[in-house]
Image (cartoon, grey):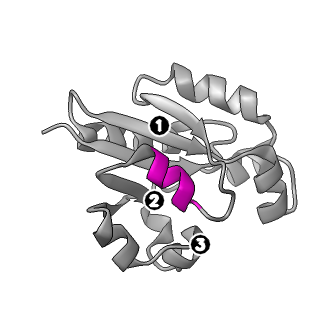
Amino acid sequence: MALSVYTGGTFDLLHSGHINFLRRCHDIAGVKGTVTVALNTDEFIYQYKNKQPILNYQERCDVLEACRYVTAVIPNSGGADSKPTIDKCKPDVIAIGSDWARKDYYAQMQFHQDWLDERNISLIYIPYTKGISTTQIKTRI
């Protein structure tokens, strides 16, 4: 079965954890499915994290577009409110890392289960790759 999978994030300093995550998204989508990444803008990252990413939006977009597990990259144009971008994509599945399992992802994305149910969208957690993160890479540098 081919599915449309949506995920979003910053994807700064693309690393093996990101690749593992995107590979799982691709596996869920299926051979003829799609994986769309809603990439956070530099402005939103600064508002949310109070710091700029290492790579700017275009650099992060270029790297993601070169990844074989990604079908399309679009800007997360709604900032903290991801609903407009999700509605634009019309995904079957929203995939997020399991590191969000103990956080309030619904509040972060500004939607509720009813909103997902109305659109027939499933939310799935993909296991987080331990031992690698952008923060850890910055510390190594």
Label 3, secondary structure: give it: helix
Residue 103 vs residue 117, the one in the foreground:
117
* Mark 1 or mark 3: whose residue is earlier in sequence: 1
* Furthest residue in direction top, as rendered: 66
In the rendered image, residue 34, in percent from the top left (x then y), is placed at 33, 34
Q: Relative to residue 138, is residue 99 drawn left or right?
A: left
Residue 19 is tagged as: 1
Q: Quadrant of residue 63?
A: top right
Q: Which mark is residue 97?
A: 2
Q: Is residue 26 left or right of residue 2?
A: right
N-terminal of the pair, mark 2 or mark 1, is 1
The residue type indicated by label 2 comes to Gly
> For residue 52: magenta?
no
Q: Is residue 52 above or below residue 111?
A: above
Q: Quadrant of residue 117?
A: bottom left
Neighbor class of circle 3 (other Cα within 10 Å; few <14, some 14-19, many 20+) is few
Between residues 103 and 61, which one lies in front from this camera angle? Answer: 61
Horizontal placement of 81 versus 35: left or right? right
Q: Which residues are magenta?
A: 82-88
C-alpha span from label 2 to label 1: 12 Å
Residue of label 3 = 108
Mark 2 burial class by Cα count in 10 Å: few <14, some 14-19, many 20+: some
Relative vertical location of residue 113 with respect to residue 40 in this rendering, above or below: below
* Magenta residues, dominant SS class: helix
| Residue 60 position in % (x across, y down) | 68, 32
- Residue lying furthest left in this view? 1
**Figure quadrant of residue 15:** top right
At label 1, the amino acid type is Ile
At 53% across and 80% down in the image, what residue appears? 104
